[in-house]
Image: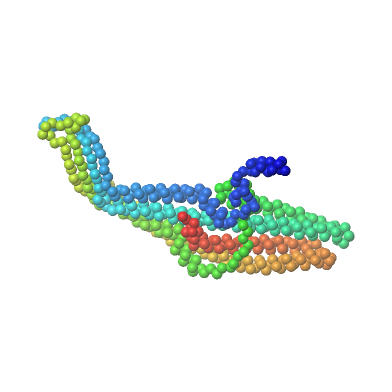
Amino acid sequence: MKRIILILCLFCLLIPSGAFTAEGDASLPLSLNECIEIILANNPDLAMAKADIESKEAALQSSQKDLYPTLSAQYSYAHQPDQFFSPADLFTYGFKAEQPLYKGKALVTSVKQAELSLGTSRLALEQLVNNLVFEIYGRYYELLRAVKLEEEAQQSVLRLQSHLKDAKAFYDAGLIPKNDMLQSEVELAQGEQDMVDAENSTALSRSRLNVLMERAVDTLFAIEDSTEYAIQNINWDEVIAKARESRAEIAQAEMSVRIAENDIVLAKAPYLPAVTLSASYDWLGDDLGLSHEPGAPREMKTIMAVASWKLWTWRKDSDDVLAAGKNLRRVQKSVAKTVNEVTLDARNSFLRLEQAAKRIKVSEKAIEHAKENFRINQAQYQAQLTTSTDVLDAQTLLSQAMTNYYDALYGYQLALAAIDKSKGLFGQLYVK
């Protein structure tokens, strides 16, 4: 008894602490939501998008501070050889405060540009999440379909093995020719090959999902089964209205127009004067220690308003305005293009959903007929009322019917996800 306890203790010590976690134990299946959480937490593209938002937030704070006054200190030395009644050497130490008042709307517009740039980055994150979550749905249902088709391939092999057993018994009894039995053996070999292909397809689908989760491609795990469905009545008008209202791509395009309009304001700013208010306080002296001659000024206080206006820049400013105007027209055209792309994406998702719904109903009936057809042909073959070819044909039809059903089932669930993606719901739901 003590030896058994010692062996168990050593076994527990040798097993890694995370061996029985949900992520590492294939007996604990991952749900779709768990996969989404893992991927959103580890995706490098999302990390870069969030870092870009933080960069734009810092840029916005910087542009806002351009509106505030600045304080500077200076220490200067000037040599004036032509001065006869004052020292030739002048040392100055002082402080200066400056407040920009007007720069042709450039200051306020720069803040607006920074705000729009931050908004664009946030919309880019929303768009990225919307597309990424839909990709997760696709990989998840791809794996589910592969698992189901692997199970169907295994069932097909069992049916072919059972048929071959009957064929050998009939051949040994002299009831069928040898070529009938050989045909059954060939079909079984093909079924086993199909099962190997199905197993490989499952492994590849699992590897694709592992890559999204930033894990080793050969990590084994199971996922929750999802064969229940309910046909939903989706209205096209609601889909397209929600897509045009909520898709981040359209909001980004419209925001780009506002940025281009502000670029024109910034380009026109040099046409207007720049006004700055400043105040300075300086100490004057003849040497580094700021000592001075009796009767000479020791301090100097200045309050000054400066208006500067560029009068000639070789038409550079007009060229900048022209370029900004051309860019605005280009961006305005891109809005219509983006709306058309979103509309086409939504329409494609809607048609795929209708197609998948119809395929499910048809495939369910086909499965019932295929199962009954196989049962009848198998019974008739055992009674020697039909040939081995009829049984094998019925088996092929049953396998094809099952494949069509799983294609339709997971195709419909993915089409529902495509509708949500077209509406931009994933981006709004998962962006925190």
Query: Can the viewer see residue 59?
Result: yes
Q: Is residue 421 above or below residue 296?
A: below
Q: Residue furthest right?
A: 174
Question: Residue 297 is drawn in which quadrant?
Answer: top left
Q: Residue at x 56, y 50 (%)?
A: 213
Residue 61: x and y, percent? 35, 49
Dividing the image into 4 quarters, which one contains the N terminus? top right
Residue 201: x and y, percent? 65, 53
Question: Residue 231 is drawn in which quadrant?
Answer: bottom right
Residue 293: x and y, percent? 13, 31
Q: Is residue 236 above or below residue 215?
A: below
Q: Residue at x 81, y 56 (%)?
A: 182
Which coloring applies here? rainbow
Query: Can the viewer see residue 345?
Result: no
> How many numbered marks appear?
0
Question: Residue 123 is drawn in which quadrant?
Answer: bottom left
Q: Residue at x 66, y 41 (%)?
A: 10
From the viewer's perspective, is 38 left or right of 26?
left
Q: Residue furthest front?
A: 2
For the residue pair 250 and 121, the one nearer the viewer reads as: 121
For the residue pair 397 and 130, the one nearer the viewer reads as: 130
Residue 264: x and y, percent? 33, 54
Q: Residue at x 64, y 51 (%)?
A: 26
From the viewer's perspective, is 82 left or right of 206?
left
From the viewer's perspective, is 152 left or right of 332?
right
